[in-house]
Image (tube, grey):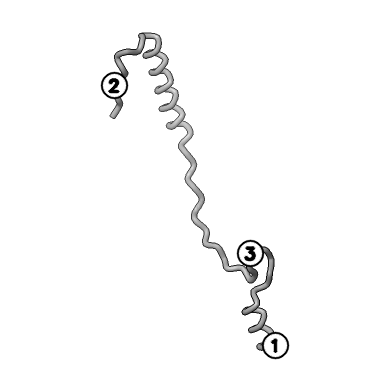
Amino acid sequence: MVAPTPPHLSPEQRERLEQLADAARLRMALYPSPKPPPARRRSRTRQYPGGRPNPWRTERLRRRRG
């Protein structure tokens, strides 16, 4: 629903407001807003933030190899 124009506006201001509303409608019709990219799940990294290796994982790997 369209809101009525405020009565305190001058005819020039009303005309300008209508032009802006028409331009906005035209822009929405011509250039619909882009859809956001699909949400990606973060894969678990093998390191803690900051680049330090995970001590539990490295300990398990050492036991498995040795």
Coordinates of residue 45 in the picture (x, y in percent): 61, 68
The amino acid type, in three-letter code, at marker 2 is: Pro
Q: Which residue is located at x 31 percent, y 19 percent? A: 5
> How far apart are labels 1 and 2 at the CA level?
76 Å
Three-letter residue code for mark 1: Arg
Instruction: Say which element carries label 2.
Output: loop
Q: Is 5 left or right of 52, judged from the image as shown?
A: left
Q: Which residue is mark 2?
A: 4
Residue drawn at 49 percent across, 54 percent down: 38
Horizontal and vertical percent for residue 6? 31, 17
Residue 34, which numbered label?
Answer: none
* 21, 59: nearer the viewer: 59
- Residues under labels 1 and 3: Cα distance? 26 Å
User: Which of marks 2 and 3 precedes in the sequence?
Assistant: 2
C-alpha gap between disc 3 and disc 2: 55 Å
Residue 15 vs 32, above or below: the answer is: above
Q: Is residue 43 left or right of residue 2?
A: right
Badge 3 crowding class, 10 Å Cα cut-off, few under 14, some 14 to 19, many 20 or more, is few
Q: Is residue 15 placed above or below 56 in the rendered structure?
A: above
Residue position for label 3: 49
* Residue displayed at 28% across by 29% down: 1
Relative to 46, residue 66 above or below: below
Side (left or right) of 40 relative to 45: left
Figure quadrant of residue 19: top left
| Number of residues whose C-alpha sits closer than 10 Å to that of mark 1, classed few (under 14), some (14–19) or many (20 or more) | few
Task: Give the label on residue 65, or none.
Answer: 1
Q: Residues within 10 Å of mark 2 (few under 14, many from 20)?
A: few
Please name the amino acid that badge 3 sits on.
Answer: Pro
